[in-house]
Image (cartoon, rainbow, N blue to C red):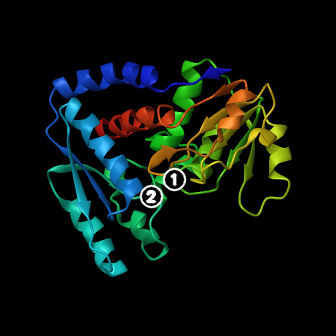
Amino acid sequence: MMLLYGKVVAENIQQEIQQKVQNGFDKKLCTIGFEQAEWLQYVTSLQKTCQKHGICCENIVAEDGILPQEFFRLVEDTCKRQDVQGVMVQQPLPKQYKDAVNFVDVNKDVDCLNPLSVAKLYLGESGRLPATPKAVLQLLDYYKIDVAGKNVVVVGRGRAVGKPLALMLLARNATVTICHTKTQNIAQICKNADIIVSACGVAGLITQDFVTEKSIVVDVGLSFVDGKTCGDVDKSVYEVACAVSPVPGGVGPITRMALLQNLLK
């Protein structure tokens, strides 16, 4: 079994970023969300990455109970700031705030979740790509895993990963199946796949019943169990599958680099 580590992939991207920053970059990235453990952990990692590359990352924490319209205005006002080059909002957001992505200026939308950004992706137009799905493809590219003609199952239909990733895989000529909480016989569907990408945030969702010795599994999930970070993939999968990206240490480091690529672009 091969572990698909993301650190080495991220290090390759760093060289490109450092060169661009050295040529002059005085703008900042702003993240906006709530005081939730998963989000704050992600932002802290992102801030450390930004600092390492000479980029300022400011995290704006909204008050609990803030009205949706006030939260949307916060996003909109942040986008208007001259010192801010990129803006991203917490994903996933509580249901009443989910439309906040509509208020992110498309020119500062580093996560590519604004409807105009999504439309460009759907139409196959060139532009920035959502960071996490982009990181998944960069990971597969580094390990020379070609998706063309392969059966790829994406577990999760979220707007941040599942849906855009499916479109990006289709653009690379993969045969894509999207599974979700209402999918019947999900384990068997995954077992018939060449590549499984799980992005649900449900710890231990993907078990050895979902894989064979030929399965390549990319874990995009993030959960906390007993104070420890874990993904969607159960440890039993490591005993069976051909290759697995671990959590932490898999897609995460590349996602942060992909965000910085979008910021600089």
For disc 1, the neighbor class at 10 Å (few under 14, some 14 to 19, many from 20) is some
Quarter residue 104 falls in: bottom left
Percent of width and height locating residue 98: 46, 69
Can residue 171 be seen in this snapshot?
no
Tell me the mark number nearer the camera, choosing from 1 and 2.
2
Percent of width and height locating residue 32: 30, 60
Percent of width and height locating residue 149: 77, 29
Q: Is residue 130 left or right of residue 236?
A: left
For disc 2, the neighbor class at 10 Å (few under 14, some 14 to 19, many from 20) is some
Query: Foreground residue, 107 or 220?
Result: 220
Quadrant where the C terminus lies?
top left
Residue topped by disc 2:
91
Give the mark nearest the N terminus, 1 or 2: 2
**Residue at 56% across / 44% down in the picture?**
231
Residue topped by disc 1:
160
Query: Foreground residue, 13 or 225?
Result: 225
Task: Indicate the amino acid at tag 2.
Answer: Gln
Q: On screen, 130 above or below 144?
A: below
Percent of width and height locating residue 130: 47, 45
Tell me the distance, in whole angstroms, between the alpha carbons under discs 1 and 2.
7 Å
**Residue at 33% across / 23% down in the picture?**
14
Query: Foreground residue, 25 or 52?
Result: 52
Q: Are marks 1 and 2 in contact (CB under 8 Å)?
A: yes
